[in-house]
Amino acid sequence: MTDDLVILVDQDGRDAGSAPRLEIHGPDTPLHRAFSLFLFDDHGRLLLTRRALEKITWPGVWTNSCCGHPRPGESYPDAIRRRAREELGVGVRGLRIALPSFAYRATDFSGVVENEVCPVYVGRIVGEPDPDPTEVMDHQWVEWEDYRSTAERTPGLISPWNALQVPQLAPILPQLMGPSGAVPGQQPEVGRTPTAEATLARVDTLLREEAACLETLWRDAVPGPPVDILGPDDLPGWLHGMVLQGGKRLRPSMCHWGFVASGGREHDPGYQDLVRVAAALETLHVFGLIHDDIMDRAETRRGEPTAHVRATRRHREAGGDGSPELFGASIAILLGDLAHAEADRLADGLPETLRRMWYELTIELIAGQRADLTGAAAHRRDLDHAITIARLKSGSYTVERPLQLGAEAAVATPEARESLARYGHRIGAVFALRDDYLGIWGDPATTGKPAGDDLRNGKATTVLGLAESALSGTAAEALGRVGTAALTDADISLLQEALTESGVRDRVEGMIREGVDTAVAALNPAHLERDGIQGLAAMAERIAWRDR
């Protein structure tokens, strides 16, 4: 049972287990997670509550609207909305994080200690308060400036956490909530919506800063002359050349639009988290590309030699000992590992809920790659397997998870998350379908990969799943050689033509169009911001009909 457990925290801010809430409060209360919520009405008034006399700590004291503890596995926004219903009988809209790093320790008159990592949130109330009398003995609406003055002049009249929170909250509250009387989402003063160009520019700046830090750390760890065989181009410079060379930036873009669609603003504390996780995603993507190229024995990527091919050539040119191919693959593995380490370093600075999503994303990516390898070895061509691979390797970490991360950074409502999840599921599938299409019919001059590359590798794709029942005769025989050394260039040309003539190509394009239409229809304007809907609709078209 997790219903009345709190999350314990170590001195480094990491989760350290859980414990029953009623048992931990005493003179030596351990550090644990909590939250404070300041609720405003549409006139800008703050809801104050007076703690019930049955409360363990600070009974009868006036404080902010609502306090509580997230349960194990529960996000802060979900915990806040649950607690607002339980304690006050109200809903919350426009939820924003104000003080993400707030923490305090205080002792009440009875000697009981509160010791909490307690981020502060603000939001608008939905409904009329109907407090639980075992939690709240009284409540009243006050003007924010009056309460700020009370906290400044007579802090002993309110809870000790409020006495610390209010002075920190005062300078940023107008930006978070708008001026007194403003309603979030209806007034321009609430804050600027960041542009995609601005977000991507910040991501690139952060990636350059990380590159400089890594170069310094690497030089300290490995001092001396240029590295053997590789020459002056050691792994950090090589890695960040790949990260910064300017790919499609689809994953950071999806993070951005998930944030904007959920009501995120440029001044929100979560915006910096958005930039950070977007940079981490772009770096993780390079890890995936490098290792994927090794496993596929791919020779080119984006029109350039792949990492293992490049390292193999360096070995040959230098007349190195041992196998050039083994050296090349080994160096590329290290380069990919370094990319993963850099991505994790970026993710390490994120709040706990985002870190948990990040971990799940990386596990899904690796699980998808494993399923791709084992399925290819088992000669899997069935459509169900292809769809599973597409979701794990492409759709999830390219579309669904970035959207989820952006929404989490913006403290999205459950309704916004659900709408984005429906969109993300369909566009994730569209992304994979277009990948499959380009893997067979893509122009090598544009994709940077050989024509028919997926046929050579024998990857489980939706196209091949459809081909099993669509081809016959010599085309079916050529299909049986896909992924084997017996496959010839003539077979590839034959299959490209046969898949077109049999209607498979048209069917895939139809599935892409249907996926786009269904995804865009899932973007509910009642729960998502208009700018975000427009951006996501444009991203759907961009993903569906990209040429590389």
Image (cartoon, grey):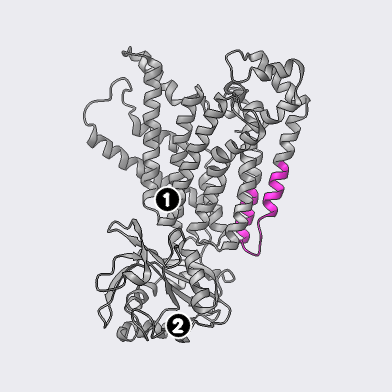
Q: Which residues are magenta?
A: 513-538
Magenta-drawn stretch contains 46: no
Q: Is residue 303 above or below residue 428?
A: above
Quadrant position of the C terminus in the picture: top right
Quadrant position of the N terminus in the picture: bottom left
How many numbered marks are there? Answer: 2
Say what amino acid the circle numbered 1 marks. Arg
Residue 185 percent coordinates (x, y) = 58, 68
Q: Quadrant of residue 503?
A: top right
Magenta-drawn stretch contains 537: yes
Q: Is residue 194 above or below residue 441?
A: below
Say what amino acid the circle numbered 2 marks. Thr
Q: Residues within 10 Å of mark 1 (few under 14, many from 20)?
A: many
Residue 126 percent coordinates (x, y) = 57, 76
From the image, tell me which residue sits under label 1: 276
**Residue at position x 34%, y 27% in the image:** 233
From the image, tell me which residue sits under label 2: 134
Mark 1 or mark 2: name the one nearer the start of the chain: 2
